[in-house]
Amino acid sequence: MVSAGAPGLIDRLNGGARRVPTWAVYGLGIVPFVFLVWGAVTDNLGVDPVKVIEHRLGELGLQFLIASLTITPLRRLGLNLIRFRRALGLLAFGYVAFHLAAWVTLDMGLRWSEMAADLWKRPYVILGMVGFLALLPLAATSSNAAIRRMGPVAWGRLHRLAYAALVAGLLHLALLSKVWSTEVLVYCGLGLLLLGLRLLPKPTVRKRAAA
């Protein structure tokens, strides 16, 4: 246990986090998107830029979703980054939405009949849709007004859909990749860890008896 006389690492990290404005998370979060757009404009995305764009957007969506879901386990350890969870979640939704839009417009060219056929032929497409639909109500209720209107208990239950989105996203990635690459294994390992931590009972805080 860290002595009371000197601030520990967690205290220093919490102090530093309090000095970071929330808008900075949004600003840093869109940097990869800017680089991706710049790569497309300068024709610097390789021989299949559409696939690169699709993969990168989906990967970023999964990364930000995982980052948002690590906030609660870290909080149990004493690291309080809860004020950044909304930004990370909205960035995850934004990148997943752009990933879907890239598939619909750039890849499929708005050919709706072919997209409908893909839903039946390729299960990973359905899983991607499930992940997006799970994130949609979370993005729509991410404001303080929505929390007040729904109540914190109902709002918390609804936002458990983030774990359904995580499972759908991991399965989408695994089926799309077709091989268990290091990338897929790392993402699935992190996802399983987060799901496992979610099932652990919440620690109880015992109050000291009055002397």
Image: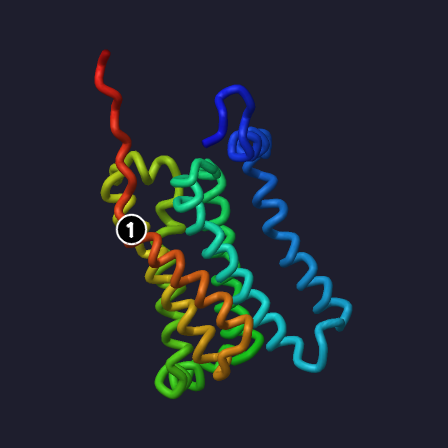
Label 1 environment density (alpha carbons within 10 Å; few <14, some 14–19, many ≥20)? few
Q: Position of residue 51 (x, y in %)?
A: 60, 77
Using the image as rendered, state which of residue 117 and residue 91 is in the foreground.
91
Q: Residue at x 40, y 51 (%)?
A: 139
User: Where in the figure is residue 200, as x and y percent of width and height?
Assistant: 29, 51
Q: Write down the quadrant of residue 137 in the picture.
A: bottom left
34 or 29, which is in the foreground?
29
Give the residue pinned by disc 1: 200
Amino acid type indicated by mark 1: Leu
Query: At 55% from the left edge and 23% from the top edge, which residue is drawn?
Result: 6
Exactly how many numbered labels are in the figure? Answer: 1
Residue at screen point 54% across, 77% down: 181
Q: Is residue 197 left or right of residue 49?
A: left
- Quadrant of the rendering where the N terminus is positioned: top left
Seen from this angle, which residue lies furthest right? 42
Query: Disc 1 on helix, strand or loop?
Result: loop
The residue lying at 71 percent from left, 82 percent from top is: 47
Quadrant for the C terminus, please. Answer: top left
Q: How is the image coloured?
A: rainbow
